[in-house]
Amino acid sequence: MQSGISRRRAAALAEGGAAYAERRAEIIASAARIFREKGFRGASLADVAESLGTDRASLYYYIGSKEELFHEIVRDAAEANAQQAEAIRDGAGSAVDKLGLLITALMSSYSIHYPYLFVYIQEDLSKVADRRSAWARQMTVINKRYDDAVIGIVESGFGDGSIRPVGPARVIAYGIIGMVNWTHRWYREGASGMPSAAEIGRTFTEMVLNGLSSGTLTPPAGQQPADQ
Amino acid sequence: MQSGISRRRAAALAEGGAAYAERRAEIIASAARIFREKGFRGASLADVAESLGTDRASLYYYIGSKEELFHEIVRDAAEANAQQAEAIRDGAGSAVDKLGLLITALMSSYSIHYPYLFVYIQEDLSKVADRRSAWARQMTVINKRYDDAVIGIVESGFGDGSIRPVGPARVIAYGIIGMVNWTHRWYREGASGMPSAAEIGRTFTEMVLNGLSSGTLTPPAGQQPADQ
DNA sequence: CTCGTAATCAACGCTTGCGTTGACTAGACT
DNA sequence: AGTCTAGTCAACGCAAGCGTTGATTACGAG
């Protein structure tokens, strides 16, 4: 059984009016900003409504619930992310090249889809929804695809010898992912003194691929003995 | 004006009974686990009480509020973290050595103080409390001390030539911090197939200091031209 | 001018969760 | 046995926030 407002929303959605779709997109964009600022639980629909200069109840003409709003924001971001990683994994080049590509591609995604991607990254999705819900299961799949793509690149590098096996592929992959994802805590698009996303990507790439050590004061690596 | 329960709590605290302190610590430890699992906003005091087999109201004999409980968990973790980073920065060794030390030290802290440290790390503190509150300002200071210690190590490495200036010191520092902190999303103490914190620390150290590239398929670094 | 549709909003019910009250219980001490 | 105290808990008040209703406004078409 549908509620009154829900029926009207479904009708408007089915009709597919351009103005309606545009207003809806506006709401989603504004909500993304709010979620980015306050987090999913910290943000209220009142905040979203206020940022749009409208009433909270009016939002329900465009969206079914706070969760639906959140899902809409996150799903596309996650899917795009996964596809990008998979495309790089399946593309041409050595594993090392691919890792470099991956890092810079992610950073520029962030720059473009900000704040959508950061909403996605900053939320620990396992804490936002019941693990058994349909949406949570979809997200688990998408996240796994993403992880597997990165892990796959590292493993292929182990195989062709282009990546030094300094540890388990999963740990290396999560290290890279973490380095990039953690930017959600400090990177602010266009803040004064803030390097560009591209510059951050280049720095990360260089440090992960070729290392920070200049080799002038420490032995130049190879396999150093486990000192513990 | 104090409420009844608050007066009794203050009295019990002032008296300093050992059993009281122990029970209080038990509550804090259990709360840390819950906060770690559900996040600050997602966890309710009912959850905490239930995990202790007691009533929610009984908690207030030991703690003043949910916030106080959270602060107690986080403050020490943050302070310990900052002091550790500062001690490493101010200790002996080259900057490269210090970075390696820092990474492994952090990872073993996590292993020891788990879940306290992860509660601290997983919460974006700017989203949990009003930025102007006394506590938030204290935390800002502690966080800055930590960041500055890491940035300081990187800068000193620039100075003595042991660290290659692949980008701004802040970006390098945040890259390392991110790599380590992101473990809160996937590292689970003692989960099956999970590497030890020490092993993860070694892997991260090796990849950041000496790089992943074997040099067999890509030019061995130096300064590569900006390709953009 | 009137009518119909798209869009808005004041007001409501409902749930969750925080913090408090004041009474109760178990056990130590006299 | 009687009393005192540390600790517990059923019950309450209160605020925030979600989703709904039903009426109202704005406005374009006829």
Image: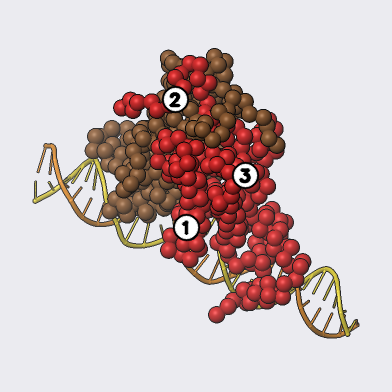
Chain colours: A brown, B red, C yellow, D orange
Identify residue type, mark 3.
Ala
**Mark identifier at residue B13:** none
Say the numbered circle drawn on residue B105: 3
Whichever of labels 1 and 3 marks the residue nearer the N terminus, that label is 3
Residue D16 % position (x, y)? 45, 60
Residue A216 in the image, given as x and y percentages of width and height: 51, 33
Instruction: Determine whether, in the image, residue A155 is placed left or right of residue A16.
Output: right
Q: Which residue is mark 1?
A: B140
Q: Amino acid at mark 1?
A: Thr
* Circle 1 Cα neighbour tier, 10 Å, few/some/many (<14 / 14–19 / ≥20): some
Mark nearer the N terminus (2 vs 1): 1
Is A156 on the left or on the right of B34, as rendered?
A: left
Figure check: A82 above or below C6: above
Q: Amino acid at mark 2?
A: Ala
Q: Are marks 2 and 1 in contact (CB under 8 Å)?
A: no
Judged from the image, the secondary structure of the residue bearing numbered disc 1 is helix
Q: Is residue B66 left or right of residue B165?
A: right
Q: Residue at (40%, 49%) from the top-left corner?
A: A37
Q: Chain of mark 1?
A: B
